Image (cartoon, rainbow, N blue to C red):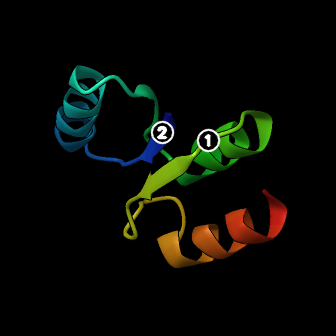
Amino acid sequence: MRVLIIEDNPKMAGAIERGLREHGFAVSTSHTGFEGEELAKAESFDLVILDLMLPDRDGVDLCRNLRRQC
């Protein structure tokens, strides 16, 4: 299962990523909303873990865009 983490806090993203990898998940991580959106469009993910309070964009708007486009 492929998981995309979009989280601006490196410690939080790292902890989530480590836990998922330990359980056999393939994980990609982005620290900005814009980068995360590009990754989501370019690759296929089964799950997106999305921080709602990103510094460069609103997480709810990003979620709406991803649902429409992916």
Q: Position of residue 11 (x, y in %)?
A: 17, 36
Q: Position of residue 31 (x, y in %)?
A: 43, 40
Q: What residue is pinned by disc 1?
A: 45
Tag on residue 68? none
Q: Are marks 1 and 2 in contact (CB under 8 Å)?
A: yes
Q: Residues within 10 Å of mark 2 (few under 14, many from 20)?
A: many
What secondary structure is found at the residue carrying circle 1?
loop
On screen, 24 above or below 10? Answer: above
Q: Quadrant of the C terminus?
A: bottom right
On screen, 29 above or below 51? Answer: above
Residue at position x 66%, y 76% in the image: 64
Q: Position of residue 44 (x, y in %)?
A: 70, 38
What secondary structure is found at the residue carrying circle 2?
strand
Q: Position of residue 41 (x, y in %)?
A: 77, 44
On screen, 58 above or below 1? Answer: below
Q: Earlier in the sequence, mark 1 or mark 2?
A: 2
Kind of residue at badge 1: Phe
Q: What residue is pinned by disc 2?
A: 3
- Quote the CA–CA distance across marks 1 and 2: 6 Å
